[in-house]
Image (spheres, helix red, strand yellow):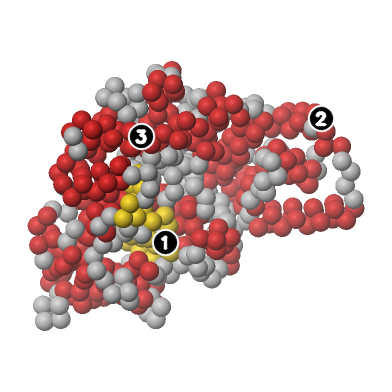
């Protein structure tokens, strides 16, 4: 089959959805009988990434055709489709063939990475420009097997492992964060409530950076003792020691720390003259997770956050600081007062993780082995689940885990979802306990549940509820995140007489 006809057929199956360059490359090479290893050597992409692209493509084709498509049966399935498809007999003019050939060549050539296209100019962080400019491919080191047994599925807890087929891409986020980390001196902010997939995405970015021989400093602020936040000097010394240990460097703060110059300047000098000098030409990724923990300590945040911005701006004029690439991950907007020109959250690239779409929920259901979800009827069956949990990745995954292996029916799962007998009871109790510890948050949540409209809340209460994943915010106006939370907390507030 000519390559033009092959790509046309697949795009028709996918409802005229254009294939990305790397998808076209993997499709055509698979049609020619090439192995993923051979494709990797030809294109320069990692073997695991090529396999991920192929597996996702076979999955998409399987959903669209309502039958299992694999690399091995690709010839049989597509030839049968062309024989049965009424549009397969349409003639193509010479001009159309010429255009198609040029288009195909462009896509196949574009799928092979070069240093030029990896270092193209930065794009704006505006949403529409992100979608246009960051469709270039990046190699995420993940394995997605064609067959996945329900017996192999682990209970959803914590980040999705790198080699798990249960990780769902949310384009263009993965492409964006991996592409941006290549830019010297970059600052990337990843924001989403708890259990939305921030750490899973961050781990894939780190794997991508390690593959390029970047040095990694991963710091989770949840690990810090409360004593660390007692003063800025103690906090920044802890910060420097932690970074040194991560890079297998012997901490030598006393050689660079000067109390007369102050903690922030000392910290800057330590990074500039010691850490960034020691690593020579290798870039360093400073991955800061759970940064909202710093928000709880305004005196620390008001110095530490502007310091990060200053480091980012130093990279515009200092090659030493261009080695540093920062990724800041947090659950909510900052609620510590900062001057506009001091905030690190209005520079660089901002990524907000959205909930799963209907198609992504269906995709994940198939990866959990729920074959009944394969066709349009199966997709319709999943709609009540989507309505109940609002596409929340953790809540969706927990439901699909219980549905896999016929542990429970979807109907019973939905009927009992907000009750003590439901699968979410532990998760819901944990949220309730957190609210009960902070009366102002409990009161704010009561206001949200009591209204069918968006409710204006105190800024800090609004951001904390958003951090917990309980509400969706538009400014300080909040509405409940999903129907599950509305049902559960309505019941709890009624019982307590609130």
Instruction: Answer above or below: position of 320 versus 216.
Output: below
Spatial CA span between label 3 and label 1:
29 Å
2 or 3: mark nearer the eye: 3
Q: Are marks 2 and 3 in contact (CB under 8 Å)?
A: no
Q: Quadrant of residue 399?
A: top left
| Residue pointed to by mark 2 | 83
| Residue pointed to by mark 1 | 350
| Residue pointed to by mark 3 | 484
Q: Earlier in the sequence, mark 3 or mark 1?
A: 1
Kind of element beneath mark 2 = helix
Q: Position of residue 209 (x, y in %)?
A: 42, 56
Q: Earlier in the sequence, mark 2 or mark 1?
A: 2
Q: Residues within 10 Å of mark 2 (few under 14, many from 20)?
A: few
Relative to 446, is 381 on the left or the right? right
Q: Position of residue 117 (x, y in %)?
A: 58, 64
Q: Residues within 10 Å of mark 3 (few under 14, many from 20)?
A: many
Q: Quadrant of the N terminus?
A: top right
2 or 1: mark nearer the eye: 1
Q: Quadrant of residue 429?
A: top left
- Residue nearer the viewer, 55 or 64: 64
Instruction: Answer above or below: position of 309 versus 228.
Output: below
Q: Earlier in the sequence, mark 2 or mark 3?
A: 2
User: Which residue is depicted at the point 53% across and 46% down?
Assistant: 49
Kind of element beneath mark 3 = helix
Numbered marks: total: 3
User: Which residue is depicted at the point 18% across and 65% down?
Assistant: 298
- Asked whether residue 143 is in view, the answer is yes
Relative to 451, is 180 on the left or the right? right
Relative to 131, is 238 on the left or the right? left
- Residue nearer the viewer, 260 or 406: 406
Kind of element beneath mark 1 = strand
Q: Position of residue 412 (x, y in %)?
A: 40, 20
């Amino acid at each position: 089959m000519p390559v033009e006809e092959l790509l046309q057929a697949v795009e028709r199956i996918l409802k005229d959805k254009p294939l990305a360059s790397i998808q076209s490359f993997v499709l055509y090479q698979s049609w020619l009988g090439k192995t993923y290893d051979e494709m990797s050597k030809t294109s320069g992409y990692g073997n695991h990434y090529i396999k991920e692209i192929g597996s996702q493509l076979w999955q998409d084709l399987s959903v669209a055709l309502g039958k299992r498509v694999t690399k091995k049966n690709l010839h049989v399935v597509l030839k049968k489709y062309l024989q049965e498809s009424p549009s397969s007999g349409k003639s193509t003019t010479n001009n159309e063939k010429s255009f198609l050939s040029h288009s195909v060549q462009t896509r196949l050539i574009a799928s092979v990475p070069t240093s030029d296209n990896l270092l193209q100019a930065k794009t704006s962080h505006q949403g529409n420009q992100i979608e246009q400019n960051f469709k270039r491919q990046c190699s995420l080191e993940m394995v997605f097997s064609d067959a996945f047994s329900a017996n192999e599925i682990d209970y959803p807890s914590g980040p999705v492992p790198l080699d798990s087929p249960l990780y769902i891409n949310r384009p263009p986020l993965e492409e964006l964060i991996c592409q941006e980390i290549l830019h010297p001196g970059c600052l990337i902010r990843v924001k989403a409530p708890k259990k939305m997939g921030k750490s899973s995405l961050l781990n894939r970015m780190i794997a991508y950076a390690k593959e390029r021989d970047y040095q990694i400093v991963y710091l989770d602020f949840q690990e810090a003792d409360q004593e660390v936040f007692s003063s800025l000097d103690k906090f920044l010394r802890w910060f420097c020691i932690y970074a040194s240990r991560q890079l297998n460097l012997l901490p030598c703060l006393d050689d660079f720390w000067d109390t007369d110059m102050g903690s922030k300047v000392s910290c800057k000098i330590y990074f500039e003259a010691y850490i960034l000098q020691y690593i020579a030409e290798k870039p360093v990724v400073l991955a800061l997770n759970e940064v909202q923990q710093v928000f709880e300590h305004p005196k620390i945040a008001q110095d530490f956050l502007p310091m990060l911005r200053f480091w980012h701006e130093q990279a515009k004029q200092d090659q030493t600081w261009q080695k540093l690439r920062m990724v800041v991950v947090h659950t909510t907007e900052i609620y510590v007062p900062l001057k506009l020109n001091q905030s690190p959250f209005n520079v660089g690239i901002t990524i907000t993780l959205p909930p799963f779409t209907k198609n992504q929920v269906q995709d994940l259901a198939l990866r959990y082995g729920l074959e009944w979800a394969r066709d349009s009827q199966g997709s319709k069956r999943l709609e009540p689940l989507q309505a109940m949990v609002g596409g929340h990745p953790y809540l969706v995954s927990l439901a699909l885990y219980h549905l896999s292996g016929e542990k429970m029916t979807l109907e019973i799962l939905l009927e009992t979802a907000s009750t003590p007998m439901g699968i979410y009871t532990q998760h819901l109790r944990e949220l309730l306990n957190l609210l009960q510890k902070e009366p102002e948050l409990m009161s704010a949540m009561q206001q949200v549940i009591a209204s069918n409209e968006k409710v204006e809340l105190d800024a800090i209460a609004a951001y904390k509820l958003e951090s917990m994943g309980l509400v969706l915010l538009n400014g300080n106006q909040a509405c409940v995140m999903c129907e599950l939370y509305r049902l559960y907390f309505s019941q709890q507030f009624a019982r307590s007489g609130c």
